[in-house]
Image (cartoon, rainbow, N blue to C red):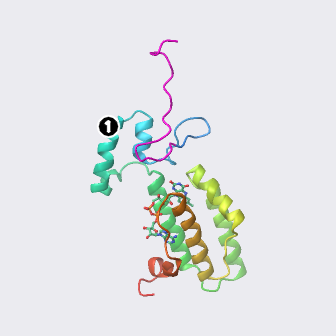
Amino acid sequence: MSSQNAPLKAPEVGISGKKIVYDKDGKPCRTCNSLLDFQMVTGKISPGAAVKAQQKLHQDPQSSTDFPPDVEQIGRSSWTLLHSIAATYPEVPDSQKQQDLKQFLKLFGNFYPCWFCADDFKSYMTKNEPKVSTQEDFGRWLCDAHNEVNVKLGKPKFDCNFWRRRWKDENE
Ligand SMILES: Cc1cc2nc3c(=O)[nH]c(=O)nc-3n(C[C@H](O)[C@H](O)[C@H](O)COP(=O)(O)OP(=O)(O)OC[C@H]3O[C@@H](n4cnc5c(N)ncnc54)[C@H](O)[C@@H]3O)c2cc1C
C-alpha cells in the first residue's frame, strides 16, 4: 500500500496533553474529551489552530460557551449540581430520602455523559458506599469522591473541612 492510501493513525494525545478518549465504536468521544481536542482529532481544526484557540480560551473562558459542552463543562456543571444537592439535603433525612439519594446517585452514574468518567465513578461508589445518613456525611463523602477525580487529573485536593463554606454558606 502506498503511503498516500495508508489509513491515518488516530492520535493518542490531544493538545490539552490528555489522552484522547474513543467510544466503543472507535470514534472520538464528544463528551469525554475537551472541545479543542475533539475538534482537532476529528479534523475540524488543525493542531495549530487548536493551540491558538486554547490560548484564546485561557484569556476568555466564555469564548466557547455556544458549543455543545465538553468533558470539562459537563464536569463543572455536574459537580455544581451534586454539591448543591448536598447543601440542600436534610440535616437528618428520613429513610425514604436516604434511599432516594442512593437511587439518584446510581442513576446519575448510569446516565453520566462521559462513559469513562462514569465507569470510574461507579467503581468508586462500589468501593466507597455513598454515606447518606446526614447532610454532613453526604457532603463529606461527595467531597472525597470529587477529590478522587482531582487526584486522577493531577489537580490539588480540596480541604473537605470547607465544603459547607464553598457550597452552602460562605460564612460557615
Ligand atoms: C462524577 C464525575 C466524574 C468525572 N470524571 C472525570 C474523568 O475521569 N476525567 C476527566 O477529565 N474529567 C472528569 N470529570 C470532570 C472533572 O472532575 C472536572 O469537573 C473538570 O475537569 C473541570 O474542572 P475544574 O477545574 O473546572 O473544577 P471542578 O473539578 O469541576 O470543580 C468545580 C469547583 O468545585 C470546587 N471543588 C473542587 N474540588 C472539590 C471537592 N473535592 N469538594 C468540593 N468542592 C470542590 C472548586 O471550587 C472548583 O472550582 C468528572 C466529573 C464528574 C462529576
Residue 126 horizontal/vertical position (percent): 71, 63
Residue 87 is a magenta residue: no
Residue ID for mark 1: 48
Q: Is residue 121 left or right of residue 33?
A: right
Q: State the count of labels.
A: 1
Which residue is depicted at the point 52% across and 39% down?
A: 28
Residue in front for this viewpoint, 35 or 94: 35
Image quarter in which the C terminus is found: bottom left
Which residue is depicted at the point 67% across and 62% down?
A: 106
Residue in front for this viewpoint, 123 or 17: 17
Corner quadrant of residue 99: bottom right
Residue in front for this viewpoint, 116 or 64: 116
Residue 111 visible in image: no
Circle 1 — which element? helix
Q: Which residues are magenta?
A: 1-20
Which residue is depicted at the point 35% across and 53% down?
A: 65
Asked if residue 13 is positioned above or below residue 118 in the image, the reply reads above
Residue 7 is a magenta residue: yes
Corner quadrant of residue 52: top left
Residue 22 horizontal/vertical position (percent): 55, 40
Residue 97 horizontal/vertical position (percent): 67, 77
Asked if residue 68 is positioned above or below residue 91 in the image, the reply reads above
Residue extending furthest top? 1
Residue type, label 1: Gly
Which residue is depicted at the point 48% across and 15% down?
A: 5
Asked if residue 28 is positioned above or below residue 96 in the image, the reply reads above
Query: Main structural element of the magenta stretch: helix, strand or loop?
Result: loop
Residue 137 horizontal/vertical position (percent): 62, 80
Corner quadrant of residue 15: top left
Residue 71 visible in image: yes
